[in-house]
Each structure stands twice: as C-alpha cells, then as structure tokens.
Image (cartoon, grey):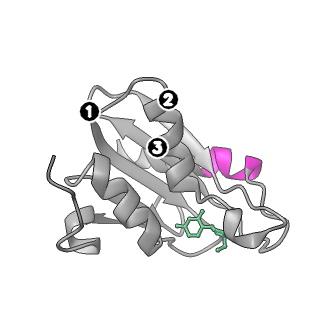
Amino acid sequence: MYRELFLQAQAVREYAYAPYSNFKVGAALLTKEGVMYTGVNIENSSYPVGLCAERAAFASAISQGEKEFQAIAICGDTEECWPCGMCRQFMYEFAPDLTVVTGSDPDHLEIMDLSELLPNGFKLEK
Ligand code: THU
C-alpha cells in the first residue's frame, strides 16, 4: 500500500513547478477510506510565496471535503524527502496520527509517524 502511494507521488512529481530551486517534489495523501489525493510543489517569483507538495495535497483533499487521513508519501529528487517544519505543523492540524512515507525509490521506503517528526505539535483548544 505504501509502495502504491509512493508510486503516485513519484508519478505526479513531474508536474511540480520548481523553476527556482529545480527541486521537484510530488506527494500522495491517502484518506482513511482509501482515497488518494496528490500535490506538487509550486514555487513563485516571490520565493516565500511558494507552496510545498505536502500542503498542496492536503489543500486538494480538504477542498473535496475530506477530513480523515492515514498516510502521505513524498517523493523528492533522488534521496528521501522528509517534510519541512512548516508542513509538519500544517499536517498535524488535520492528522496528528499520520504516517509519513518517503525514500529514494519504491524499493527503499522509509516510514515514520508524524508524532515522531513533530513531537508536541501545536493545537489550539476549541
Ligand atoms: N519542498 C516540498 O515541496 N516538500 C518538502 O518536503 C521539502 C521541500 C519544496 C519547497 C521548494 O519548492 C523546494 O522543495 C526546495 O525547497
């Protein structure tokens, strides 16, 4: 299953818009019901405006009404690509129990829980 998810992330990676860093990233997000949503990084002439692939995938899924997520796979250049700090906090809002999958290729996956990548993430009590 994680292999399939990573393969999807790898497939969409070509759609990334990364003319400034030349570092293309693809992400594939799996809902608890088994639906997959993808995202890519989208850079901008004004550099800080750029969006990471992980947040693009979440934005797509949430825009379709999804609320429960089980795993995200991330495919960067040739090495594993762990989510940046901003994305860890972004994902924690919606899926504190998320599984994060990355790797250099589908046969060399590395898997960690978001709770390990972001211990004590911030959440406002509502
Ligand atoms: N990037 C992602 O999309 N996801 C990550 O996990 C790491 C970094 C993007 C942001 C920027 O467009 C490029 O990779 C180089 O930092």
- Amino acid type at image mark 3: Phe
Picture coordinates of residue 125, whole percent (x, y): 14, 53
Residue at disc 2, secondary structure: helix
Rendered image quadrant of residue 78: bottom right
Q: Which mark is residue 58?
A: 3
Instruction: Specify which label sits upstream in the sequence, 2 or 1.
Output: 1
Question: Label 1 is placed on what type of residue?
Answer: Lys
The secondary structure that dominates the magenta segment is helix
- For disc 3, the neighbor class at 10 Å (few under 14, some 14 to 19, many from 20) is many
In magenta, the rendered stretch is 10-15
* Marked residue nearer the N-terminal end (3 or 1): 1
Q: Which secondary structure, mark 3?
A: helix
- Residue 14 spot, x, y in % from top left: 75, 51
Locate residue 97, reporting x and y percent: 19, 53
Tell me the quarter of the picture where residue 36 sits: top left
Looking at the rendering, the quadrant in which ligand 1 lies is bottom right
Q: Which residue is mark 2?
A: 63
Q: Which mark is residue 32?
A: 1
Gap in angstroms between the C-alphas marked 2 and 3: 8 Å
* Numbered disc in front, either 3 or 1: 3
Circle 1 crowding by C-alpha within 10 Å: few under 14, some 14–19, many from 20: some
Residue occupying the point 27% across, 63% down: 114
Magenta segment includes 82: no
Q: Is residue 57 left or right of residue 67?
A: right
Above or below, 68 against 96 in this view is above
Q: Amino acid at mark 2?
A: Ser
Q: Quadrant of residue 29?
A: top left
